Image (cartoon, helix red, strand yellow):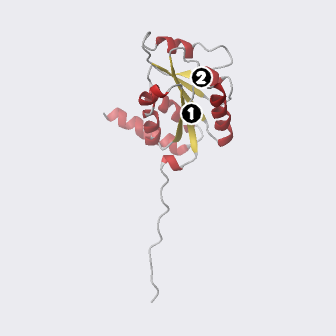
Amino acid sequence: MANKTKPQAAAKKTPRQQQLLVRIIIGSKSDLETCQPIQKHLDELGIASDLHISSAHRNPAKTMELVKDAEQSGIQVIIACAGMAAHLPGVIASHTVLPVIGVPLKGNSLSGEDALYSIVQMPPGVPVATVAINGVKNAAILAAQILALAHPKIRENLRQLKLKMAES
């Protein structure tokens, strides 16, 4: 008698193993604690992302390489987090056609208002979608909403998240 074994189901890919759809770029290592939850929120929505530290002022060449690589590798949304002068989101937006979401971060002197004004006041032709100061969860949800236009599974995950929020 032949040995019958059940065919194994294909292993479900975790968000980290899927095609990267979102690149998160933060301006400083000190922003890591505030910004890492973006990946957690994206993971919960089934969206693969990566996170890089690159200052628009201290390492503009690296920042531009991250933007160029994002377009070439199929990333569809960039989330850029920065405090104080907060030029990172605008600099990124000026070098790509991908949607850029800016997250102003709370700084020491002006509690993040300086970063908010810097990100939201982009010149015509270089838009940056802007969320609240330290609004990392909304940045993840906005990225998911953009991606949901072309990804039905992400759209369904968003529906489930909205239902869960309504219940709680």
User: Residue placed farthest to the front in the image?
Assistant: 58
Tell me if label 1 and label 2 are in contact, CB under 8 Å: no
| Residue at mark 1 | 146
Identify the amino acid type marked 1: Ile
| Residue at mark 2 | 58
Q: Quadrant of the C terminus?
A: top left
| Frontmost residue, 115 versus 97 | 115
Examine the rendered structure and indicate whether residue 107 appears above or below residue 81.
above
Q: Is residue 2 left or right of residue 68?
A: left
User: Residue placed farthest to the left in the image?
Assistant: 168
SS assignment at label 2: loop
Choose top left, top right, bottom left or bottom right for residue 6. Answer: bottom left
| Frontmost residue, 127 versus 167 | 127
Q: Is residue 22 visible?
A: yes
Closer to the N terminus: mark 1 or mark 2?
2
Identify the amino acid type marked 2: Arg
Residue 158 position in % (x across, y down) = 46, 38
Residue at 58%, 37% in the rendered image: 149
